[in-house]
Amino acid sequence: MRKLMVITAILSILISCSQKGPNQVEQRIDRIENGLIEFKSPAEMLQPSSERLANPMMLTERMGHYNVPGVSIAVINDDRIEWAKAYGTMDVNSGAPVTTETIFEAASTSKFITSAMALHFVEKGLIELDRNVNEYLKSWKVPDNEFTKEEKVTLRRILTHRAGIPTTNFDYDEDLGIPTLVDVLSGSPPAENKPAIPVWMPGSQWQYSNVAYDIIQLLLEDVTGKPFQQIADELVFEPLGMTNSTFVYPLDAKKQKREAMPHDAKGISREPAMHETAFAHGNLTTTPTDLAKFSLEIIRAYQGKSEKILSQSTATQLFHKECEIDQKAIPLPFFQGLGVFLMGEGKDLVFTHPGENYPGFISWLMGWPERSTAAVIMTNGAQGFMLAMEIVSAINLEYNRTL
């Protein structure tokens, strides 16, 4: 009996201690929240200098520095979403707090999901990566011109921004109505963007293109006979439980209550400026937790643990370095994968896709597939780009540099 009482007393002490002190995850969050560092170059993000490490700053302090009202973060570690946390306000006008259920614009991070959807149908044999996309397109075709005489626009070239399609914005004449997807691709009124027509020979050079990814939207719709959003629901969102994610905009009434508003560089609340028909390049609205669910699934596919969307061989192909990107175009040592940017080798292999939507949304997703770690940061401030990089840097130091 006395022995049982001693054991009970010891267990009580241990439980009491565990309740009083923060657990390991809470300690990690605290170190990240208080361990942001300012760097002058994006190249310092994953390799900050010891001098800068000696002067850490608080996350909330950096939010104020950049006039970013709200931040939401999700972190993957050890084959699971280890934590998610939100900071600040959805809209400075209302003062409503950001929560982990607050919905942000993913901007060009959307391309990561679009690319995985396309590769799924490549894997199923419905599309070939290196075949002329006009062989699959029905509603509209890429017009032939002097640049397509010898080389054609293919899915691989679109995914790797080497299809010869120009960079463009998505303005349109509101007096004439909302342009259809075909209007956008052809650059026809009411659309006022450059058309998705090659302006140099496909395969000849790298040039980031948003409208090229909207060719993928039409390609998938024509091949499957289903709307792009339905494909995303059936293939990605529903199987992964991404209940806060959609490519359709405006959001439904229920989601609008949790929709963050964009803020300009001065921190002034603005109205969203999302396109209503061209989805694939940057129209995803979601939460960091949902994006983390997707990232975790792709990491697990890469490791041969899951095939809900892609097989291991296709996930490996997704993370294959197709070409090096000139640092004059992007000031980071990026390689282009099939829909994501890549850095490093082996344990330090990194996949990433940042995003920026006017007038004030920033998204940054970065993962280490060999380490089973990843981070998703979303902000509702136009100056959130560097802030997100500072957060990624702190997460990398906490989870990867210590291994």
Image (tube, helix red, strand yellow):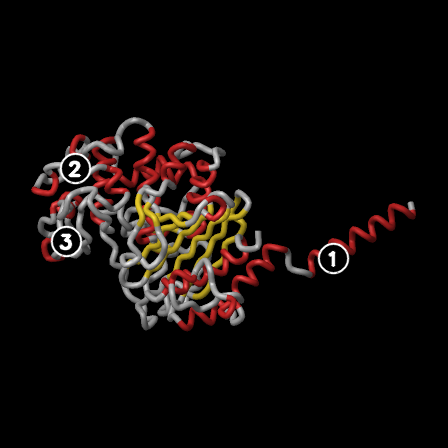
Disc 1 residue crowd, few under 14, some 14–19, many 20+, Cα 10 Å: few
Residue underneath mark 2: 152
Of badges 3 and 2, the one in the foreground is 2
Q: Position of residue 243 (x, y in %)?
A: 41, 44
Residue underneath mark 3: 193
Give the residue displayed 33% in from the left and 55% down from the top: 355
The label on residue 238 is none
Residue underneath mark 1: 16
Q: Distance between the residues labelled 3 and 1?
A: 63 Å
| Of residues 319 and 20, the one drawn nearer to the viewer in this rendering | 319
Q: Where is residue 83 in the image (x, y as percent from the top left)?
A: 53, 52
Are the residues tagged 3 and 1 within 8 Å (C-beta)? no
- Secondary structure at numbered mark 3: loop
Amino acid type, mark 1: Ser
Give the mark nearest the N terminus, 3 or 1. Answer: 1
Amino acid type, mark 2: Lys
Q: Quadrant of residue 125?
A: top left
For the N terminus, the quadrant is: top right
